[in-house]
């Protein structure tokens, strides 16, 4: 099937825009690859330190440089349900590596915070900041130059983007991402949302709310709604860094363990045998476009309008919001997973999941099929589903060609919507992102007076006092990356949802983030320039008439902003203590939340990547 013309045009302009930066990146990568494994150039003292704690057989293999050594970079902790299953993975990986003729060592760990725990709390100010800390931690883990390839264990929001940025810093290393899988289905997400709204209205108490939340988030594995964590897993499959069909297999099952072992074998194959395949050559312009398309057709997380740009920058690829916007107009919405529907990711996987989607899109000319993956050349291998064999191994078979549940998953010929549902808004207030795939058409245009708040807590207090029983557009400002780290404002969803259900016209405009789980209330987010930079949002006053038109792609205000001074607020106070100071200091080092990729330029040179 010929490539869709919009896809071809966007691809061409990204390649042209990235020509110099991509060429410089590949030159560094290939120079490092040409030198061969760096371990062979370590001094005897360096090498002795590197394998001192290994088992005798592994030590002998490393001493003789007879076998490849795989780095394990892990985001394990047992507070984060999605990452708790990784506790078992290093031993599984080490055993599988020995069986495949290799050695594996845990090279290092990276931070892994849970946005679900910090949501609405001061700790959320460190969430976006943590992505670049994770990238730097990944680079630190790999800086020992002991490794010929790498396996990355990570799932959630900022963790996979951070791992990717760090991995691309050492882009000459073949790399495989190893998922842990979602927890089994618990309390349906719609019921959880209903209880949250009842709690916001004061109709149920904390005990009932906690019971509902505990029934929803109930066991090891990723949360089952389609937020940033599960969007990450989708991206890794669409971009050729997972094994086919492996993203949404539940943890602690025989198939999950078999896939982990198979991932190790594939890492060995692309490191020491077959076709040497470094991650920096897999993640080119076409791979990132495939990732954006996967995001759009599944209604994935708006957070990736930030993360994908930073991830691509680490590979010398320059993406813009216009690329997202134009691709969104060309690809259909093919999945309804909460918050865009009632199903969870387990239902989505059972309906055909990612292998079905990838096959549909390839047949329609809506993906680049001629890409490199960890399996070799071409995305056709990702039309397959994994199955357990009688001996406990894994085999891959062609995926279903028809959706097993068209309420959850549709073919290209019968989409839920003609476009991907992610749009850019422009106007006097600047530029913003909005996801409309979960917003009903009747709520996509809101014209109403502004009510200005400087925090999400201030809005919640006004809601509890009964002051918001009217049409309005909530303007939440000083929430950008320079102000306080751009925390998610997901805590606003229940209150705004209650008001919308009462028949009021409500919307949100903010220079902060909403969430990968943003839902039915129209939200213009990531507004730039932000308030702290003197952006127009800092000139809005309560009562100004704002029009958010997601259909036309505009965000306008009926007020003379040019004649006003931008308001400021005191940002020195912070209940989290040193959180803002930490963010400010790191921002000065890495250049803000847009991308810390340039920080790793020095490492690229020094580490030969």
Image (cartoon, rainbow, N blue to C red):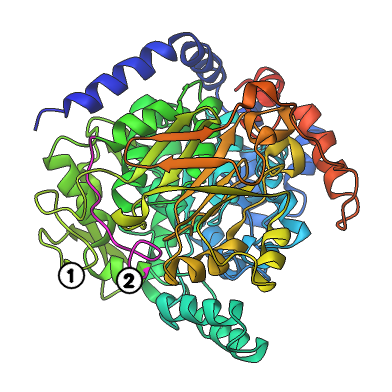
Residue at position x 50%, y 36% in the image: 432
Residue at position x 15%, y 35% in the image: 365
x and y, in percent, of residue 83 in the image: 59, 64
Q: Quadrant of residue 271?
A: top left
Magenta stretch bounds: 330-344
Badge 2 marks a residue whose secondary structure is loop
Whether residue 327 sits left or right of residue 64 in the image: it is left
Q: Where 361 sits versus 98, above or below?
A: above
x and y, in percent, of residue 118 in the image: 70, 63
As drawn, the label of residue 343 is 2
Estimate how packed mark 2 is, as few (under 14), some (14 to 19) or many (20 or more) residues with alpha carbons within 10 Å.
Answer: many
Q: Is residue 570 visible?
A: yes
**Closer to the camera in the image, 32 or 354:** 354
Q: Quadrant of residue 594?
A: top right
As drawn, the label of residue 578 is none
Disc 2, disc 1: CB below 8 Å?
yes
x and y, in percent, of residue 214 in the image: 57, 84
Q: Where 336 sits versus 196, above or below?
A: above
Q: Where 548 sits versus 507, above or below?
A: above
Q: Which residue is mark 1?
A: 405
Q: Is residue 374 visible?
A: no
């Amino acid at each position: 099937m010929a490539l869709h013309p919009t896809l071809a045009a966007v691809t061409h302009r990204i390649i042209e825009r990235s020509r110099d930066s991509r060429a410089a990146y590949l030159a560094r990568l290939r120079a490092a690859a040409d030198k061969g494994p760096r371990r062979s150039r370590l001094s005897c003292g360096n090498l002795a330190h590197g394998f001192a704690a290994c088992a005798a057989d592994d030590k002998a293999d490393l001493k003789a440089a007879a076998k490849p050594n795989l780095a394990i970079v892990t985001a394990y902790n047992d507070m984060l349900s999605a990452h708790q299953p990784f506790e078992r993975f290093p031993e599984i990986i080490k055993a599988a590596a020995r069986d495949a003729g290799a050695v594996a060592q845990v090279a290092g760990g990276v931070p892994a915070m849970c946005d679900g725990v910090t949501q609405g709390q001061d700790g959320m100010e460190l969430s976006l900041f943590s992505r670049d800390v994770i990238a730097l931690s990944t680079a630190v883990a790999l800086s020992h130059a002991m490794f010929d390839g790498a396996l990355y264990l990570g799932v959630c929001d900022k963790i996979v983007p951070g791992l990717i940025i760090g991995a691309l810093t050492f882009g000459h290393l073949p790399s495989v991402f190893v998922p842990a899988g979602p927890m089994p289905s618990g309390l349906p997400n719609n019921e959880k949302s209903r209880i949250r709204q009842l709690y916001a209205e004061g109709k149920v108490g904390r005990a009932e709310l906690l019971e509902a939340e505990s029934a929803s988030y109930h066991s090891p594995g990723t949360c089952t709604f389609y937020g940033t964590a599960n969007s990450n897993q989708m991206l890794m499959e669409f971009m050729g860094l997972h094994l086919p069909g492996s993203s949404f297999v539940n943890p602690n099952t025989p198939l999950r363990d078999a896939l982990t072992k198979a991932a190790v074998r594939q890492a060995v194959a692309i490191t020491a045998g077959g076709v040497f395949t470094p991650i920096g050559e897999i993640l080119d312009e076409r791979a990132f476009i495939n990732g954006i398309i996967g995001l759009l057709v599944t209604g994935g997380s708006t957070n990736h309008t930030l993360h994908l740009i930073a991830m691509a920058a680490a590979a010398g690829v320059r993406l813009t919001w216009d690329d997202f916007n134009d691709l969104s107009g060309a690809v259909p919405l093919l999945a309804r997973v909460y918050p865009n529907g009632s199903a969870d990711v387990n239902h989505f996987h059972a309906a055909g999941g990612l292998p079905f989607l990838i096959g549909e899109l390839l047949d329609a000319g809506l993906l680049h099929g001629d890409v490199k993956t960890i399996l070799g050349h071409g995305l056709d291998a990702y039309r397959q589903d994994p199955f357990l064999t009688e001996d406990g191994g894994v085999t891959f078979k062609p995926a279903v060609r028809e959706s097993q549940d068209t309420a959850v998953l549709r073919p290209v010929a019968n989409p839920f919507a003609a476009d991907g549902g992610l749009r850019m808004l422009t106007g006097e207030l600047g530029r913003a992102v909005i996801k409309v795939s979960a917003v009903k058409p009747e709520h996509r245009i809101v014209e109403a007076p502004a009510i200005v708040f400087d925090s999400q807590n201030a809005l919640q207090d006004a809601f509890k006092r009964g002051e918001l029983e009217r049409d309005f557009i909530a303007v939440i400002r000083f929430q950008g990356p320079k102000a306080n780290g751009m925390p998610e404002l997901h805590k606003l969803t229940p209150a705004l949802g209650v008001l919308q259900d009462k028949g009021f016209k409500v919307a949100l405009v903010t220079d902060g983030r909403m969430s990968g789980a943003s839902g039915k209330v129209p939200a213009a987010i990531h507004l730039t320039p932000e308030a702290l930079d003197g952006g127009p949002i800092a000139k809005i006053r309560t009562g100004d008439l704002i029009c958010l038109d997601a259909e036309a792609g505009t965000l306008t205000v009926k007020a003379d902003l040019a004649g006003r001074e931008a308001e400021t607020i005191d940002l020195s106070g912070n209940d989290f203590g040193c959180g803002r100071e930490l963010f400010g200091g790191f921002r000065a080092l890495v250049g803000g939340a847009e991308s810390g990729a340039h920080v790793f330029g020095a490492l690229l040179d020094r580490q030969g990547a």
